[in-house]
Image (cartoon, rainbow, N blue to C red):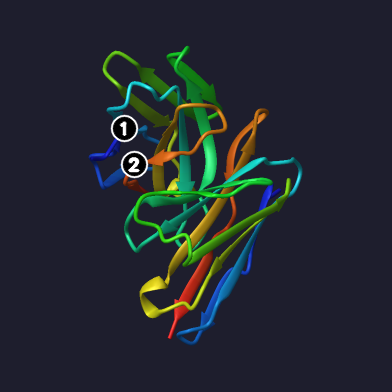
Amino acid sequence: GAVVSQHPSRVICKSGTSVKIECRSLDFQATTMFWYRQFPKQSLMLMATSNEGSKATYEQGVEKDKFLINHASLTLSTLTVTSAHPEDSSFYICSAGDSNQPQHFGDGTRLSIL
Amino acid sequence: DQQVKQNSPSLSVQEGRISILNCDYTNSMFDYFLWYKKYPAEGPTFLISISSIKDKNEDGRFTVFLNKSAKHLSLHIVPSQPGDSAVYFCAASKTPTGQLTFGSGTQLTVLP
């Protein structure tokens, strides 16, 4: 069964809306989770590393004020796309792992901004 | 600069034959390598991994080979089945729980 749960799977909303995506580790505690973005026919690009109890680490070129990450517990990280615009439309995926298992991925969130 | 490369965007194989997917990396700091399978609009599914202290890891129909000196790894699937048709991503990290750097993926099509 799934060990990482991501919700929602699909979001369609108007430009200017803020969208929150949740990522939960189901059977283990994850001090670190990762957020990726995938454009059509391209690879997964790391956006940021979510650290439980501290600030997220963002990759170069990723706006931290645009993509807010909160990792408030050992099983939950959230990504909020603030004031989303059409260019933010993409497939967002989270992952988590621990010392006993490799990183597992959520099923992703397809975000469509109209 | 791509640190993990999958030079073949696609591969077609007949059912029952062997599928060989290749991956090259440039960063010598990578110590863990993983293969994921991905269907459209879904997250990647973990298949198999290998650490740099090994040169081979096998799990059922899947075997991963690592040639550290050549910075090359490959995934062998035998026998290939139509259900194996998907995009396969190679990924590498410096630590077991560290961030993953992905290759661009290879679309495998297994023909019945």
* B66 is higher (above) or lower (below) than B82: above
Which amino acid, by three-letter code, is at mark 1?
Cys
Say which residue appears at 47% left-offset and 53% top-offset: A36
Numbered mark located on residue B96 in the image: none
State the separation of the CA atoms marked 2 and 1.
Answer: 8 Å
Which residue is nearer to you in this view: B55 or A14? Answer: A14
Question: Where the C terminus of chain A falls, by quadrant?
Answer: bottom left
Q: In x, y percent, where is residue A39?
A: 36, 62
Whether residue B112 is visible, yes or no, is no
Task: Using residue B11 as the reference point, say whether residue B50 is left or right of it.
Answer: right
Q: Chain of mark 2?
A: B
Mark 2 and mark 1 on one chain = yes
Whether residue A50 is visible, yes or no, is yes
Is the C-beta separation of discs 2 and 1 under 8 Å?
yes
Q: Which residue is mark 2?
A: B103
Say which residue appears at 51% left-offset and 28% top-offset: B49
Q: Secondary structure at mark 2?
A: loop
Which residue is nearer to you in this view: B56 or A103? Answer: A103
Q: In x, y percent, where is residue A74?
A: 73, 45
* A27 is higher (above) or lower (below) than A39: above
Q: In x, y percent, where is residue A61?
A: 34, 56
Say which residue appears at 47% left-offset and 13% top-offset: B54
Task: Using residue B64 as the reference point, say whether residue A56 is left or right of it.
Answer: right
Which amino acid, by three-letter code, is at mark 2?
Gly
Ranked by sequence position, the earlier of labels 2 and 1 is: 1
Disc 2 versus disc 1: nearer the observer: 2
Q: Which residue is mark 1?
A: B23
Which residue is nearer to you in this view: B5 or B22? Answer: B5
The crowd level at tag 1 (other Cα within 10 Å; few <14, some 14-19, many 20+) is many
Q: Secondary structure at mark 1?
A: strand
Q: Chain of mark 1?
A: B
